[in-house]
DNA sequence: GTTTTGTGCACTGTATGCAGAATGTCCGCA
DNA sequence: TGCGGACATTCTGCATACAGTGCACAAAAC
């Protein structure tokens, strides 16, 4: 590890990571942008993607766009049909149920691991997020609630300190992001989801891995039910 | 659905599927080829990939090669360093342990599902593979054993009838393929692995999901141990 | 009227060319 | 002799140009 000032950073100095200016390659930016466009519904499921048109819309040539589409295909957000290009993937109810089942298994694993090996500070962060979630629920702010909700699930997986697990979870969460949004329609469904989150917070605070896994499982099963009814 | 001979194929005629000539896009072929090159060790971990050189070696221009590298990066087989191109990913022991833990969770899920919902014919196929495995073990044919071994694990996941699960499993199995090969060094280790497979076959034949999941878990834990010692 | 065949268009797949970034090297200077 | 800086080389990243494929529409034949 080399340091900027020819020695290791002095104790007490600000961590250098805060200063690096993030330089993402163009195709990386396109990946991010397209992912958002898919999850936010700007690209409808089943829609064919015209490379020239979309490239112009993004102000980018076809090359980085095509590379980005390959990446998104790997994440299952678009499908590549030979000689016909990319199509925004549309999820059947079975697709959703299948992905949710895997997502559930991954988060249960994450929950167990998190209770075993997370630092107290790490757990405290998740609980702080949970506090925010509660506030947003009380205020009835749907969108902030939704985002914090996602953040909590991601944070728990992060606590598990398993990059492979984290990556797989990210992929599935991105797939479900758009769909999940439908899941919180009626107030009583929302209340149920919030109650499950309370249980999750309690279990995590106690580092009770089995209890946490159980709640997470229930949370996903009921989440799928909520989607099924609204789909 | 249009038919070739202006009507539906006559009963008794050969199924037309046997005649379609498979046309994979060039970049698809490159993906497959590169994946093999990585798992078979022709590209060493940590090695930088020179696009022009590798392109010439494969007889392909840089464009499809670059697209293929994006796909492989999504599968975690190579890493993309900005402005420095692709390097073959090298796995630390923790990386391996992390991936194995996820692989274990996925296969346990698959095992439970397979016992619940697989057809008798599907289970019979896996048991037939197991029979071949036993023969290869008795004969001491390492490479065929290894391939059938992989095929059995894949087949069980296929029985679970969950494409998302199957895809995730494929990715992780590809990552571990090269490493696993080390895991069967001494004869006693091999014998232990074979014994676990016997248990798996028995549990699957009985459709005992919990037992199957338990053996699969043990199989992976011990598999990781076998790797740890040899690594 | 129905089916079939030909032709044109639009779009993807691949190759190549060009600019910029990073690294290694060589020379000058202390 | 050691260090710093400018330069050259190499390779990636992106854009563009070209070729080939599939599809749609139209015209002709049965």
Image (tube, coloured by chain):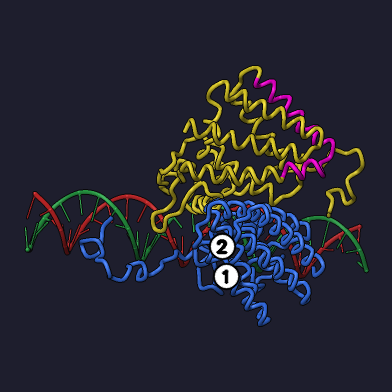
Chain colours: A yellow, B blue, C red, D green
| Residue assigned mark 2 | B155
Q: Residues within 10 Å of mark 2 (few under 14, many from 20)?
A: some
The answer to which of B210 and B230 lies nearer the viewer is B210
- Residue A122 image offset from top left, x and y in percent: 80, 37
- Residue extending farthest bottom: B139
Point out residue B162 in the picture as x, y percentages from the top left corner: 53, 51
Tally of marks: 2
Q: Looking at the image, which residue is at 61% across and 37% down?
A: A220
Q: CA distance from mark 1 to mark 2?
A: 9 Å
- Does residue A116 appear to the left or right of A81 in the view shown? right
Q: Picture quarter containing residue B174?
A: bottom right
Asked whether residue B83 is drawn in magenta, I would say no
Q: Main secondary structure of the magenta part?
A: helix
In which quadrant is the N terminus of chain A drawn? bottom right
Task: Name the secondary structure under disc 2.
Answer: helix
Protein chain holding label 2:
B
- Magenta span: A110-137
Chain label for disc 1: B
Residue B103 in sight: no
Q: Which residue does the numbered mark 1 point to in the structure image?
A: B129
Whether discs 1 and 2 lie on one chain: the answer is: yes
**Residue A125 painted magenta:** yes
Q: Residue at x 56, y 62 (%)?
A: B155
Instruction: Establish if A229 lies above or below B136.
Output: above
């Amino acid at each position: 590890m080399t340091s900027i000032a020819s020695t290791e950073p002095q104790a007490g100095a600000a961590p250098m990571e805060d200063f690096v200016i993030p330089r993402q390659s163009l195709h990386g930016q396109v990946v991010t942008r397209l992912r958002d466009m898919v999850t936010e519904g700007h690209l409808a499921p089943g829609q064919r993607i015209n490379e020239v048109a979309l490239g112009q819309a993004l102000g980018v040539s076809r090359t980085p766009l095509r590379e980005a589409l390959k990446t998104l295909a790997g994440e299952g957000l678009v499908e590549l049909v030979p000689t016909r290009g990319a199509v925004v993937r549309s999820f059947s109810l079975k697709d959703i149920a299948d992905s949710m089942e895997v997502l559930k298994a991954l988060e249960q694993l994450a929950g167990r691991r998190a209770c075993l090996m997370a630092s107290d500070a790490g757990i405290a962060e998740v609980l702080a997020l949970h506090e925010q979630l509660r506030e947003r629920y009380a205020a009835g702010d749907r969108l902030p609630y939704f985002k914090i909700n996602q953040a909590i699930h991601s944070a728990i997986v992060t606590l598990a300190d398993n990059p492979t697990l984290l990556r797989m979870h990210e992929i599935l969460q991105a797939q479900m992001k758009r769909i999940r949004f439908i899941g919180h329609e009626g107030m009583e469904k929302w209340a149920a989801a919030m109650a499950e989150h309370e249980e999750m917070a309690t279990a995590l605070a106690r580092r009770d891995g089995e209890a946490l896994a159980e709640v997470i499982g229930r949370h996903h099963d009921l989440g799928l039910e909520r989607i099924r009814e609204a789909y």
